[in-house]
Image (spheres, rainbow, N blue to C red):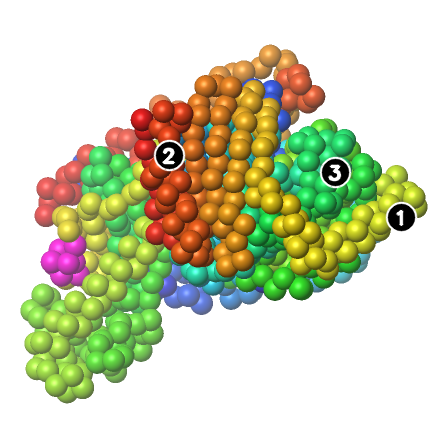
Amino acid sequence: MIIGLDVGGTHTDAVLLGKSGPVKQVKIPTDSSDLFRTVLAGLESITEGIDPRRVRRAVLSTTLTTNMIIQDKVPPVGMIVAGGPGLDPELFRTGDHYHIVAGALDHRGREITPVDRGQVREAARSLARRGITQVGVATKFSVRNPEHELAIAEMIRDRFENVFCGHQFSGHLNFPRRIATTYLNTAVYSVHKDFFEAVRKSLAAKGLNVPIRILKPDGGNMSFEASIGHPAQTILSGPSASVMGAVAFAPKDAVCLVLDIGGTTTDMAILIDGVPLLAPRGIRIGPYKTLIRSLLTESIGVGGDSVIRIRDGKPIIGPRRAGTAMAFGGPEPTPTDAFITLGLSKEGDAKKARRAMAQLGRKFGLEADDTADIVFTAACRQILDSAAAMVDRINSKPVYTVHELWEGQQIRPAHILVLGGPAPCFAKKLEELFDGPVSVVPRWQVANAIGCALARTTSELTLFVDTALGVATAPGEHFTRDIAHDFTKQQAIELALELLREKALRRGANPDHLEMEVVEASQFNMVRGFTTTGKNIRIKVQVKPGLIHGYDPVSETMTNDL
Amino acid sequence: MLKAKHKTGLVFFPAFDWAISPTHPEREERLLYTQDQVFEEGILDIDGVIEIKPDLVTIRDVQRVHFCVPDPWAVMTESHFISAGGAKTIGMAVAEGKVEKGFALVRPPGHHACRVVHGARGFCNVNIEAIMIEYLRRAYGIDKVAIVDTDCHHGDGSQDIYWHDPDTLFISIHQDGRTLYPGTGFVNDMGGPNAVGTTVNIPLPPHTGDEGFLHVIKDVVLPILEDFQPDLVVNSAGQDNHYSDPITNMNFSARGYAELTAMLRADIAVLEGGYSIEGALPYVNAGIILAMAGLDYSNVREPDYDPQKMRQDQNLSARIREIGSLVLENWRNRRLNSAHMRINKDCGRRRRRIFYDTDNIFETQEETIIVCDNCPGALRIDSSSDAGNRILAVHIPAKACDNCRRQGLQWYEQADMERFGQAFLQDRQADEFKEKRP
């Protein structure tokens, strides 16, 4: 059996999944001032009365690192960066302990200026003097050649507990994002590690020796051991839990919009043929733009508890939340009051809900029922309009080849899947307004925790081959290999897949169920003068986000449960 | 956080799957390292720099400018529709105020493409700036436009298209035609009889460096622009004046290009040539984008840049100043020059041979413009190529007077279809394009 646990802002959901179906589900309030207790309480109650030997693993999605970053509570850590010509690295300063040293590489990873070792030593002295124990190192174009980052790390390793290098975290080009990504990983490392070690110890003390995995924002998981090296890959995993919870029920040959409707917000995502769409660059969190891979999700301020304003005689829903709905004793009318008035839900105090709608209706000169209908319609329409705008943004993403532009297919969602607390109520109205089927994810209230439990171990890898320089590099894998001048694109793809396989296994993937795919494979002849001097090959491969095998039937059974 | 002073739109279309031929300078690899540099610098993450997906141009857009023989499909590939579309997309974003400045980083380029197109010349098939400008005029009522062509090669195609248009100021700064393709663009080429002065050629001697270029911009180009008062300034931003360019002989630097961009303050830049794909383009393009957005470009530098080596010789500086004074003198005397030209009764006629180096075609043109005091004049071109096509092309400008319009329609209607394989009418007043065959 597998445990899935998703810590949300107000509730923490946990499920226990067996091969033949969900065994148990719990919902407990989240104590955001003590996440450790929340996680333990969730795990304890979900395993109560269960033989611990039957639990294969627990997959957790927490807001631990997310909260640290958003609330600006990260401990001080050091950064050493080398940029060389271009934008001034000072523009990307991450805090007080930020040192710029000389050293530069060009776009093919060739050295322009050697690293200034004196400056590195000076920076290290200054950091050590101020009691810094964790240091990040990032240099421009390090994904093309990590030597500068490695040289700096090597020089200072003895003086600090941990030194992280930028090329470890992503193979993508973007120096400012590399700096931010390295910084965040360095900054959340200690808290992340201490937290999960403590969780593991407490569980072990209770005889629950289950391996712990952690959900990533790209809808995949990684083992706790692997997360130590990539601690920032635990941020913003919440939305991906919900998306993965919907995956099992998405049509396998259509574009599907996923709506996770909560009290305050609605998270939107797109599944294409059952596979979630990834964000093109990386997560943005607080002031930081990063290279941390994530599912493409957008959040809007419309939910069951959103307040209702009136503009030009029309209701505008959200983005503020004043409390619960009036039907549950809250202070202001909400969409929840509207659907209760409409008889779509039996929960809450129907009289209070009706009073809320009547009160609001006086501003329109309408009865409670009519008011409820226009309010609820407006809420659903706002969600659909925002989703349409998101789809437009996805469709207007630039492409760089004639083929892609000419053949470029536009995505249009044909199906909607809804989950979250008020999912069934919203689904009924959305169905009226949307041209296509709208369905509710089975066990919509804990689908996020199920998504957590069933998420596959994902990873990605970039391989860069320059046959003129005779070298293949996979940044982050500590992989640099001399290659022959006649190395081909096909060989590069094979090499990339082989490296990806090793990487995914290291992160805890099941070797029998690796769904690897080539995301990008391009090859350019490098012509100097009138002769071809070599080939420039770029390969990106990934393990597709998806669900683990063997448990898919669980989901099917659950469908039948309804 | 880094924020652009001027909201700047960017269409980046490197056409990674299109080449003239595998080892041709205009090949897949050309903007690869520019992409690497722009991505790695994080320029697309800067607040106020936005990337816009290019739209395609339509056949109508192309035919507002060109006479394609026998038709646009024969002389254009998908890539040309996108590259011209990239320029148009940027133009629209600027015209609609979505962005303050726009840069179309697209290929293939266009400034050697003339009004009549039998094939490709100088790596160009259709003139992407002209297609954009004529669309903007039609859709947004923009009137006076200035094009400043800073490609190292003379922008002979743009010159040809705007030779008779007094509302388009075309300024080309290029390596002297006696030393480089296409061999044209001399100081005394100043435009046709209805538009004397609005073609400005500034041929510079080989080895001109930052000092020379920036002098020409500041002391020659800017004063002329100030006089002309354009509604829109377009920079044909070729990057082959760079010291490392393999097919030219200039000494301009990335920093110099950025400064030029900052001084010129063009509304729209469109990439033209530039074939030092590793040593120049990544840095020049980064510099141009930063300069357009009003950001600090002072630290953008080529790895091998040595200001000492690139210092301009004193004699060369003196020669450049002389050329500049000559250009300014012509500009100030443009009315007088026009009167002089019009003394010659045949000033409305030109007979020319045009060579399409890329496609190896020879074209012979007989051009007739109505010398007119009231409008840019109706234009008639009798064009034949050694590929065997002979066509009649008639252009009626948008501002044509009644007489010139009548003359244009008459030329087209009375075309001797025994001599021509095709006759075309580009009626810009009606925004129509007509064609007939024998």
Classified by dominant secondary structure, the portion drawn in magenta counts as: helix
Question: x, y percentage for residue B119?
Answer: 50, 27
Left or right: A92 with respect to B382? right
Chain of the residue where label 3 is placed in the rendered structure: B
Q: Is residue B344 at all visible to an observer of this figure?
A: yes
Q: Amino acid at mark 1?
A: Ala
Left or right: A306 with respect to A164? left
Q: Is there CB contact under 8 Å for labels 1 and 2? A: no
Q: Is residue A250 above or below residue A94?
A: above
Q: Amino acid at mark 2?
A: Ala
- Identify the residue position indicated by label 3 in the image: B175
| Cα–Cα span, label 3 and label 2 | 40 Å
Give the mark nearer the N terminus: 3 vs 2: 3
Q: Amino acid at mark 3?
A: Gln
Same subunit: marks 1 and 2:
yes
**Residue B415 image label:** 2
**Residue B318 image label:** 1
**Residue at the image position 60 percent from the left and 49 percent from the top:** B193
**SS class, disc 2:** loop
